[in-house]
Structure formats: C-alpha cells, structure tokens
Image (cartoon, helix red, strand yellow):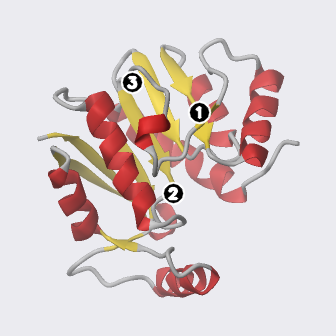
Amino acid sequence: MKKHAPAALRNRAPIAEVLERELPKSGCVLEIASGSGEHAVYFAESFPQLEWQPSDPDEEALASIRAYREEQSLPNMRAPLRIDSSDPASWGVQNADAIVCINMIHISPWQATEGLFTGAAQLLGGRNSPLVTYGPYLEQGVETAPSNIAFDESLRSRNGQWGLRKIEDVDRLAQAHGFARSARYEMPANNLMLVYRAA
C-alpha cells in the first residue's frame, strides 16, 4: 500500500532547509500533489509546530499517504484530502497559511498549475503567505542542463500536456492571480524552488 519515491529521500532535506526559511512559524500548510506521502511525513516531523495537510487526486497515492500517517502517528499530520489542483472550487479547504507543491507543475497539464494559483489566491490572497513550488524549470538566460532537456523530452513523449515550464510563464500566471515571485533557490539535481507571495 505504501508507495516509495526514491527522489523524495534524496531531496527532502534540502527542501526542508528552504521551507524552514519560508514557512510561517505556526499554522496550516496545504501540500498539493503529495504523491507517496513520504515528504508529508518528513515535513510534519521536521516542523512539529505546523499542521501538515497532504492531498492528492490519485487514490493509490491517498492510500499510501494514509499508510505512512498511520505508521508514524504524527499528531500534526492531517488525513489526506482528495484534491485535483485543476479544480480549485472543489478543494474543500477553508484556510491555509502556506501552500507547498513539489514536482507537480511539470508532470501535469498546464490547467493544474492554473488551478494551483487560482486556489492559492483564494486561500492566501491578500496575506504575505507563501506558495512554494519545487521542480525543474526552463529559465531564460540560463542554460538548461542536458539531463533536464532529456527529462522534458521524456515527459512530452509520455503525455503531450506535460513538460518543463518556462519560469516567465509561471511568473506571468502568478502575477495574474495577485502574486509575485519573492525567492528563487537553486536545488540539487538541477531543480529550483520558487516562492510566490501576494504582490
């Protein structure tokens, strides 16, 4: 029942270092597209003062998250929610003090990213609360690593709606929803963490 994502074990500590700088000291963090749930467990353990709300649209992922949650018995890790980021009207979340989205933007249709910012505007709009994203991006003026070029080609061959996104396109989408990029962190394996807050 528990799923295992090898990349989650490799990148969780560097991601947590950035989250420590960017997340609020207390409150609820909504994680969109939690996948296996390994990140959710690690971050709930790392930030005991925060309530961690995992979510995913996939039933197998939700079952995996539940299994990890049951195994760890973390008081600040909530039961996962079925959330399709492309449909923010159905998120069913009343409040959040931050949103974290790891490795979703490139492995989903663009509508999922549009929904992510629409939902973030509804939950975080008007406050200095962060929307934190992680993954590989295409960046103007920065040479794309050969491994990311190959990854992009692989993704697009699997699904024509997937693929690495241009940072300027994500920035424009954020701006259209009242956000501005407040931070950019270079991460291992040619990934980036981009942080958006209300403009």
Q: Quadrant of the C terminus?
A: top left
List the single residue furthest toward the right: 1
The part of the image, by quadrant, that contains residue 63 is top right
Residue at x 26% of width, y 79% of height: 142
On screen, residue 101 above or below 113: above
Residue at x 55% of width, y 27% of height: 53
Q: Is residue 25 visible?
A: yes
Q: Which tag, 1 or 3, sits closer to the chain's start?
A: 1
Find disc 2 in the rendering and name its residue: 104
Side of 144 where 125 appears, left or right: left
Side of 63 where 111 appears, left or right: left
On screen, residue 169 above or below 158: above
Few, some or many C-alpha atoms within 10 Å of disc 2 (few <14, some 14-19, many ≥20)?
Answer: many
**CB of mark 3 within 8 Å of CB of mark 2?**
no
Q: Is residue 193 visible?
A: no
Tell me the element at label 2.
Answer: loop
Q: Position of residue 110 (x, y in %)?
A: 41, 66
Q: Quadrant of the N terminus?
A: top right
Find disc 1 in the rendering and name its residue: 54
Type of amino acid under label 2: Met
Side of 54 where 181 appears, left or right: left
Tell me the element at label 1.
Answer: loop
In whole angstroms, how far apart are the C-alphas of marks 1 and 2? 14 Å
Tell me the element at label 3.
Answer: loop
Residue at x 54% of width, y 66% of height: 107
The part of the image, by quadrant, that contains residue 22 is top left
On screen, residue 197 above or below 192: above
Q: Which tag, 3 or 2, sits closer to the chain's start?
A: 3
In whole angstroms, how far apart are the C-alphas of marks 1 and 3? 12 Å
Few, some or many C-alpha atoms within 10 Å of disc 1 (few <14, some 14-19, many ≥20)?
Answer: many
Q: Point out which mark residue 191 bears.
A: none
